Amino acid sequence: MDTRTAVSSSPHRHTRQARWQWLVVTVVAIGLPFVLSDYRLFQCAMALAYAIAVLGINVLTGRSGQISLGHSAFYAIGAYTTAVLIDRFGVPYGVTVPVSAAISLACGYLFGLPARRLAGIYLALTTFALGMATPQLLRYKGFEEWIGGVQGIVLTKPDAPAGLPLSADQWLYFFTLAVTALMFWLMRNLIASRLGRAMMAVRDNPIAATAMGVDVPFHKALAFGISAMLTGVAGSLGAILVQIVTPDSLTLWLSITFIVGAVVGGINSLYGALWGGLFIVFVPHAAERISKAAPGAVYGLLLIGLMFVLPRGIASLRRVIFHSSTKRS
């Protein structure tokens, strides 16, 4: 085969493979509620919710070059917004998701305004302080009347809309799947837009980006806001799925978990966030089944091994397979 012909056909073959892969993923995702137990379905729904939060880290770090150790705060904003609206005001749960997204976007952008002057370890330390302070603020007695203090807010699992022959867990899975698909579609279009290219220019070389007319401070703050919006949506879905929101579940460890998911999935890959969400939910359970005495050690060993085998994340595995098949042809 002529080399030029092989090279020109490779992108088309890659596109066809990607389409078939996503078709298979879509069919499997839609079929899961009819073959899994309610508990496994709940785990899959939580993996999707966490994938949205990991997507927020990918947008912030992978696309704009900023580091955050405090995204549990934005997850808390989304979760408590949904919980308060449902519990105190009787707002339908579906309406609370876009409200949580809007509030998280505003809070993230406002936090990003002063943080845009920071970079690297200094930004990481600032967001670390945010993640540390959030659980303490949620326990403050002055807010207890609204957000329940240490006890948090307990919600009721919503049933499927009238006429749909689905259980509550099946419906919540489909609801979470639809929101996840929407978030990934929005971010895919954002990255391909002029705004997405400007954010990547800020990540690669802020001085060159400024010379080309890019407003670096604005795009840094906006990236923070978009990332916070995604994490807030994840928090909103998490509150609906778990049916309880407490300060103890929104600690700094949650922020670290999001970063782990982003690195494991692939920090520069939007769809690597799906692998990150699955890793966050299922690997700790697998580690506990392997060793109930030391699940943390097993989890650490699995994480280290994965980083040695796939240092660019699980999303890079498809690229490796594609390149190897291209060389053979």
Image (cartoon, helix red, strand yellow):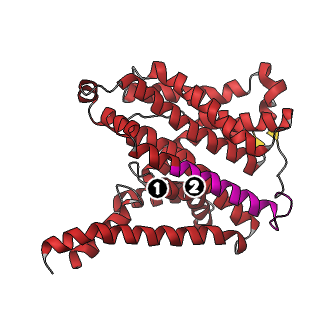
Relative to 261, 174 lies left or right: right
Q: Do the residues labelled 1 and 2 touch (CB within 8 Å)?
A: no
**Residue under numbered circle 2:** 181
Q: Which amino acid, by three-letter code, is at mark 2?
A: Ala
- Is residue 286 rendered to the left or right of residue 273? right
Q: Quadrant of the C terminus?
A: bottom left
Which one is nearer the viewer's eye here, 39 or 35? 35
Residue 311: quarter of image: bottom left
Residue 62: quadrant of the picture = top left
Q: Give the range drawn in magenta.
A: 161-185
**In 3D space, how far apart are the residues under numbered discs 1 and 2 (Cα atoms)?**
11 Å
Residue 320: give x, y in percent of width and height.
Answer: 31, 66
Q: In which quarter of the image is the N terminus?
A: bottom left
Reply above or below: 298 against 224: below
Which residue does the numbered mark 1 point to in the structure image? Answer: 271
The answer, for residue 136, to whether it is visible in the render is yes
Q: How many marks?
A: 2
Residue 157 at what x, y percent from top left?
Answer: 82, 52
Q: Which residue is drawn at 33% across and 35% down?
A: 203
Up-down: is 4 above or below 312? below
Please give left or right for residue 114 compared with residue 132 in the image.
left
Which residue is drawn at the image coordinates 81% and 31% (left, top)? 148
Question: Could you tell me the amino acid type at mark 1?
Answer: Tyr
- Locate residue 245, reporting x and y percent: 75, 40
